[in-house]
Image (cartoon, grey):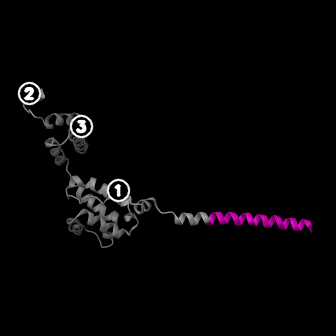
Amino acid sequence: MEAQVEALQQQIAHQNAVLAELGKQLEAEKQKKLELPANLLNLLCGNSTPPPKPFSFRSEDWTEWITRFEQYRTTTPLQYMEEDQQVSKMLYYMGGKANDILNTFKLTEEEKKSLSQVQRKFNSHYVTKKTKLYIRARFNTREQKEGESADEFITDLQTLGKKCEFNTMTDELIRDRLVVGIHRKNKGANTYL
């Protein structure tokens, strides 16, 4: 009889241990559900990310604008909204012409609700319009603007130079453009010699 009592006590102890472990797991699951996503927590704490500025509707600005929008989308509650609402927000932040351009795309009503489909169409609309000749023309006519620091001018030249696809000549052509395009008080023929 003592052996049976001891066996029952061991079973009860084992079941209590299993119940305690299940209780811990249940508590951990409750905690997971209570944890807020970091982005939402930041928003609730006042760390909000401002929306991107309206898009200029110039091809050369598209890549930067869509990158800023994606940064905004993923750091705000926008990422938790329905996809069609995300599309609406993107179009709203782009500005007035966005809907007109969207309506020129051959998209079904369902595709117009898909953020990836809409972004893909805008990408092909703006990225393919950038021609190497146009970008190179901008590079070759770029001069330092009044009030623009030398660092800003150099950074812009480097950015344009990369887009021009000059390959091994990029650094030399940037240097040449820098020499010709930098703003000097006494610009003259002897300035470059």
Answer left or right for 71 relative to 183: right
Figure quadrant of the C terminus: top left
Is residue 10 found inside the magenta-colored segment of the image? yes
Label 2 to label 3: alpha-carbon separation: 25 Å
Residue designated by label 1:
71
Mark 1 residue type: Gln
Q: Is mark 3 on a helix, strand or loop?
A: helix
Decide which of tag 1 and tag 3 comes sooner along the chain: 1
Q: Residue furthest bottom?
A: 109
Q: Quadrant of residue 89?
A: bottom left
Figure quadrant of the N terminus: bottom right
Decide which of tag 2 and tag 3 comes sooner along the chain: 3
Residue designated by label 3:
170
The residue lying toward the viewer, choosing from 153 and 163, is 153
The location of residue 102, given as percent across then percent down, is 24, 67
Q: Residue at x 21, y 37 (%)?
A: 174
Mark 2 residue type: Asn
Q: Residue furthest top?
A: 193
The location of residue 112, given as percent across then percent down, is 30, 69
The residue lying toward the viewer, choosing from 177 and 45, is 45
Mark 3 residue type: Thr
Answer left or right for 193 relative to 32: left
Q: What is the magenta range?
A: 1-26
The location of residue 106, given as percent across then percent down, is 25, 68
Q: Decide: is 152 above or below 18.
A: above
- Foreground mark, 2 or 3, reads 2
Count of number-bearing discs: 3
Residue designated by label 2:
190
